[in-house]
Image (cartoon, rainbow, N blue to C red):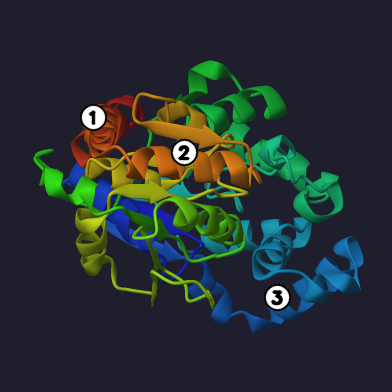
Amino acid sequence: MKKYAFIKIRSNHAIIDQIIKILAHTFPDYQLDVIDIKDILRNKIFYVFINLFHVIKIYGFSTIFESKSVIYNRFFGTPYMYHVISRLLDSHIAKGYAFTIQDCSLFNGKQRDIPNFVYTDHTVLANKNYPSYDEKRDLLAESWINLERNIYSEASMVFTRSEAIRNSVINDYSCDPSNVECVYFAPFITTRSGVVNAEKYKRKKILFVGIEWERKGGPQLVEAFKQVLEVIPDASLVVVGCAPTILLPNVEVIGLVDKEYLPLYYENASVFCLPTQREPFGIVFIEAMSYSLPVIGTNIGALPEFIHDGINGYKVNTGDVDRLSALLIELLSDPIKCEQLGKMGYGIYHEKFTLEGVSSLLNHHISRFIV
């Protein structure tokens, strides 16, 4: 049987599970091998300790006091680790693979003459586009960015989840536009019919789904919800994915749940709201749209590509609590409008973000490079 490899650097991550599902659907006649870089490094702990020296040398000792995401990116954002991973992968990539495809662009999966594809939702230089951009915090070293450029240029093709990141790969890294394609992403759901119970729009229930409360704009949503309660005292807010302390009435904090339980919350909500401060893509918005929910997000990352004001939801500037509360009040007060926006959102989901649609695009482009 023909086979290929998916090389991943993230472990125990729902997105990785979904990518594997997409790939299996795309090439059902191929054997899919999964290569986990972290598993490889666990057996090469010597390299890990040496790399810690390089992290401190390049980014400073203060790195250990940064957020987990910053520490993670800096750990893999050293030229030393880049070259270590490339050498280690050489012994794990079988010569018989038809191709390899890698998750994100924190390493280079290209080996020998085997076609390699990059599937990413972000670039380092795309961080410059966020309102909260901080060069010292958000950028990796120039020596790493030069290597990141190699990852894209050496790939047979680069696949992105949004046009915003496609533009970054092309413009920020001087890549050939014909080798960079936006194929989008299919969320963790099965194809849906779009038929919903219109009664849910009358429940005045706001849904927030996110693991990182601060980054996803949770505190701003709470401030906006205070204003909502002054006008609509029976409105409610449901928080899924994290467990912040919120001292307000009508708030239900669910915390982390298994993904199979997420449909229960989407099906019972009236409006989806995530005033995120930093967002490479925003899968939860697509999930919400698949359940015909109107969505409220922010003017960052890929969100303007699929949130269209007055069509399927609204966008606000990050930190604009007054505008956020006004939109929530408007939607919770008008269930008919919620239903109309929700139906349009479902149409956008069905057009671009289904498993079948993403698989078709990947198959079309990858098939040109394999026998």
Image side of residue 148 versus residue 32, left or right: right
Disc 3 to disc 1, C-alpha distance: 55 Å
Callout 1: SS = helix
Mark 3 = which residue? 47
Callout 3: SS = helix
301 up-or-down from 32: above or below:
above
10 up-or-down from 105: above or below:
below
Mark 2 = which residue? 327
Mark 1 = which residue? 340
Mark 1 or mark 2: which comes first in sequence?
2
Of residues 70 and 4, the one nearer the viewer is: 70
Image side of residue 234 versus residue 87, left or right: left
Mark 2 or mark 3: which comes first in sequence?
3
Residue 209 image offset from top left, x and y in percent: 40, 59
In the rendered structure, find residue 206 and report the number of the disc placed on it: none
Residue 169 in view, yes or no: yes
Disc 1 to disc 2, C-alpha distance: 15 Å
**Is the C-beta separation of discs 2 and 3 under 8 Å?**
no
Residue type at mark 3: give it: Tyr
Mark 3 or mark 1: which comes first in sequence?
3
Residue 28 image offset from top left, x and y in percent: 15, 46
User: In the image, what residue occupies the spot 34% across and 60% down?
Assistant: 234
Q: For marks 2 and 3, give the one nearer the viewer.
A: 2
* Mark 2: few/some/many CA within 10 Å (<14, 14-19, 20+): some
